[in-house]
Image (cartoon, rainbow, N blue to C red):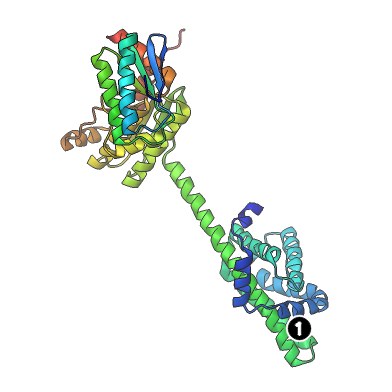
Amino acid sequence: MGGPIPILKVGPNLLTTIHVELTDSIAEVFQQDVLRAIERTGAGGLVIDISVLEEVDTYVARVLADTGRMAALMGTRSVLVGMRPEVAATLVRMGYGMEGVETALDVDRGIARLASLKENR
Amino acid sequence: MAHDASQFSVDERELQSRRAFFELTDDDLRRLAALRPFAERHLDDITEAFYELLLGHLETRRFFPDDATVRRVKAMQRQYFLGLFDGRCDLAYAQNRLRVGAAHERIGMAPKWYIGAYRRYLGLILDRVFEEVGDPVEARAAYQSVQKLVAFDMSLALDSYIDANLQTLGRHQAAIRELSTPVIRVHDQVLLLPLIGTIDSQRAEQVMETVLMRITEEKAEVIIIDIAGVPVVDTEVADHLLKTTAAVRLLGARTILTGITAQVARTIIQLGVDISAMPTRARLADGIELALSIVGKTIAPKAV
């Protein structure tokens, strides 16, 4: 758990708010931290909150999408929440729609989304 | 409405450079101050003669619809006239003169009218100066000073007129932009954007920005985009709509496309555009029903 981004266990889920710029090294540590936290807690869901991020480039977007896919391999559903309008517009303009990644408007709705995904499984 | 006038301002450096170009020296100002008694004597007859021109001309008379307005502007004109003979030309003076242009822009009086009116003004002053100042050399110098300050005033009035005009233009453009993407809140967490008219790239960009902004503001789960009023839906328009849908999805919300006419349905399929990323409906009513069901509500008949 060496990274600067805290990962909290909230009920059956993990919650993490990315509050720093995701550089290469931070991104890698973040990914590892998330996966180890899933291993350790057996959390059913993962909420990644990016409402603080004013910029998300395709590299960061890929790290986030990959993290979700890796979590899925471990049986944990994830949802990306709080993306800012200008970030969404930029990603789409660059042709990066992050298909397959679950999204929600905020943390509360992200948790609700995880619950409904669980029901439908 | 003082905020309009204060938008354009002049600093000390600009003031000095302008005065230098108009050759408006301290000697001129002293000469003007010495004419103050002359100005006070002719205050009323010059003002009256000035308004004779403005009120005698059909196109300028409409700016002065009633007696109260005429009285008000005459009082302002007297202040303005006496201001020429205060013997000062500092920042406060310039600021005061800037208001003239902004005020004319506000009432829609074009520069040609007030430049023409200034001409009458100078003419009136010229006649009286030469009548009363005995020495022709002195009279010419006095008149030159008046002319310099009046030209200086005109330059400021024109600048602020242009600036105010640009701002008006900007406001109109903003209003048009807003009108072209009227996002309406239909219900809790449900927004509606009725698109009307042609969608080009620029408008599509703006549609996307507005939609994303409003979804975030309103915490909306669903946005219905109704394209019944869009005359042509081609590959490009479909592509724009798909991009907006993708961005909306990134925020965690969903898009429903309604107003698909038979013609549009045919075009989309014939063009081979895949718009399966967004649920579509022909009628807006069906789209609203679908949107409500997404947020966990239904429209039910009233129990009798």
The residue under the point 40% across, 21% down is A16
Percent across and percent down for residue B34 are: 80, 79
- Of residues B22 and B71, the one nearer the viewer is B22
- The extreme front residue here reads A2
Residue B257 can be seen, yes or no? no
Q: Secondary structure at mark 1?
A: helix
Question: B139 above or below A86?
Answer: below
Comparing A74 with A40, the one in front is A40
Q: Amino acid at mark 1?
A: Arg
Quickly name the residue at label 1. B128
Q: Is residue B184 left or right of residue B200?
A: right
Quadrant of res B32: bottom right
Residue B237 visible? The answer is: yes
Q: Quadrant of residue B156?
A: bottom right
* Within-10-Å neighbours for mark 1: few <14, some 14–19, many 20+: some
Horizontal placement of B108 versus B54: left or right?
A: left
In the rendering, at what x and y percent does residue A53 appear? Answer: 41, 32
